[in-house]
Image (cartoon, coloured by chain):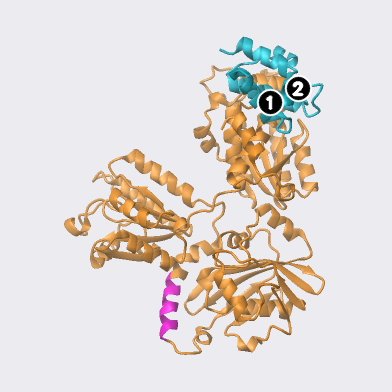
Chain colours: A orange, B cyan
Amino acid sequence: MTLNEALRLINSSRENRAKEAPVVLLCGFQPLHLDTFLQAHAVERLAGERIQVAAGLYGDLRGNIKRAVQANATTAALVLEWDDLDPRLGLRSSGGWTSAVRSDIESTCQDALRDLLELIGQLATKALVAIAGPSLPLVPLGHTAGLQATAFELGLQQQVAAFLQEVSAISGVRVLDPLWLARASPMASRLDTKMWLLAGFPYSAKHADILAGGIIDLLYPASPKKGLIVDLDDTLWSGIIGEVGVEGVSWGLEQHTQVHALLQQMLSLLAENGVLLAIASKNELATVERGLARPDVLVSREAFFPVLASWGPKSAAVEQIIRTWNVNADSVVFVDDNPMELSEVQTAHPAITTLQFLPKDPAAVWDVLSRLRNLFGKPTVLAEDRLRTASLRSGAEYQRASAVASGGFLPTLGGRVVIDYHKDPQDKRPLELINKTNQFNLNGIRVAEGDWLARLQSDDTVTATISYEDKFGALGKIAALFGVRQGQEIRITSWVMSCRAFSRKIEHHTLESLLRTRGAARLRFDYCATERNQPLQQFFAEIGIDASSPSISREEFSIAPQDLPHQVSETPQ
Amino acid sequence: MNDIQTRVSQCFANVFPGVAPADLPSASAESLARWDSVAHVTLLAAIGEEFSLDISPDDFDELTSYKLILDYVENHAN
């Protein structure tokens, strides 16, 4: 966007000071247009809501970070430039570029990066931090022509790369990929020499726009898609398996079908990261199973659930898969080589994302792989992500078993519920649950990571993360609850449970434990009906919580531990 | 109001959204409290972008009112 477009977007956004999320912009230069573009991209990302950008002092990046730590900042954008490491690497210094000062510049940079690493570590205990490394060209201080790198310049770049690698490993820190930035904003158009000298702002408006967009996406990422449905013939592999047979389909360099091997590797990676995979194929199921059982397939058969093969419309198979996964169509991606199948599915499920796999066009395949990374990418992969497909599979077995069992099914499961009341800023799972769960959700309110970290600092906050396992397998951490202690009451502000854990009375166990162990005489709920939280509404009705004044006392909650089906343990006791 | 004047006014409105359109032609760094150094740089960058002008550092210091900016654009814009 242009600077004028950014200004207009900000001016047309909803001004609601009370709701504006505060973001600290940490840089050593004048923030000028970067501030403007950050606000404008936030308006776009947050559906018209504004952020409030606070910048620090000119030329004092380290001091600005220290002040952000002291001020308990919750969300920070740190934009580093070479002259933050040593002013001689900027255009507003006259400290010299001769060989005599180079070793001093190297050691000054080393010291600065060491300090920054420590300060960012402190900041990240309280705030979500997005970091962009130096993105401007180095000043022309090499003895070579510009195309020949010097050991000095490569050394500086190596120092920064090592620094970014270290900070990227800190929980709560997200680093803008320099290669992404290189693709989006060519080096030659990043610098605005006049504005740097005149106003202390070094970036062209175009570069500031791209940089700000990247930072806002790091701080407020789009919700990742959850599941991918893939076709087989000429998509997962080359060839029509029903015609050429199991040994006739291919994915390899020798057969010039390597693009299918690339897709298989991508799917294997996505499965490892917790993405649900399923197959929708027009084939005989027995043939499909034989194809998937070939030992050289690069994605494991277990990664796919369910595998549907029939001669019916693909949209019906997609419908069945979405129901099995219990997700919404808008969190699903469908990949097929056939434009007619894509169109048929898209018409029946308008919210689904469809991608055409064009095996004869390797550049288009590369684009599909890149899009898949972007659609499913998430800042952190949690242990629960890796359990998801296995627990869906065991969930299907659970449903079958519960359907044939007569009363008293739950106590036969050998279920174990662990309710963890520790406040752990390193554990991102509760926040992930709150921000992606729709059905069993107290109010649908999403929580920014910075706010969540700030809440954990408070002594009055009560948190509970609930894990579950039974004879069908472990579901992992499937529920989270946030509350605030107010005298004899706990006011529950967030409460969510994954749909994978429904029908096991885990929600009953949770309330029973809270009232028994947390010293609260009454639980009060920040409840709000949403379009999709009927399971929560039904639970409230079942245990007699009045939706117009949602609360329950120890006396009113009439379920004793022995009336509930599972073994429960709490940490701390 | 000609096309240039309309576009200059729009840039002013982008940078000073609270100023009534009728008050813009009399706006200056002296009369508008919000016309500080940051607003000045933003305004001239917005003008430069709108008219594809590369405003020189010397001119930056001189362009301190709506009228001066309008004159400058009328003399320099293609």
Could you tell me residue A355's position as x and y percent? Answer: 37, 48
Give the residue at the far left of this rendering.
A243
Which quadrant holds residue A492?
A: bottom right
Asked if the residue under mark 1 is in contact with the one under mark 2, i.e. CB atoms within 8 Å, the reply is yes
Magenta residues, dominant SS class: helix
Q: Secondary structure at mark 1?
A: helix
Which quadrant holds residue A244?
A: bottom left
Q: Answer whether residue B50 is visible to the viewer in this image.
A: yes
Residue, x 70% and y 54% (percent of image)?
A451
Give the residue at the far top of this rendering.
B75
Q: Which residues are magenta?
A: A393-404
Q: Chain of mark 2?
A: B
Vertically, is A432 above or below A513?
Answer: above
Q: Amino acid at mark 1?
A: Phe
Q: Secondary structure at mark 2?
A: loop
Q: Amino acid at mark 2?
A: Ala
Q: What's the distance in space between the residues labelled 2 and 1, CA to CA?
A: 9 Å
Q: Nearer the viewer, residue A276 or A18?
A: A18
Residue, x 48% and y 55% (percent of image)?
A225
Could you tell me residue A401's position as x and y percent? Answer: 42, 82
Q: Is residue B38 magenta?
A: no
Could you tell me residue A256's position as x and y percent? Answer: 25, 43
Q: Answer whether residue A165 is visible to the viewer in this image.
A: no
Q: How many marks?
A: 2
Could you classify mark 2 by the number of other residues whose Cα lies within 10 Å: few (under 14), some (14-19), or many (20 or more)? Answer: some
Tell which circle, 2 or 1, labels the residue nearer the N-terminal end: 1
Reading the image, the residue beneath label 1 is B12
Reading the image, the residue beneath label 2 is B27
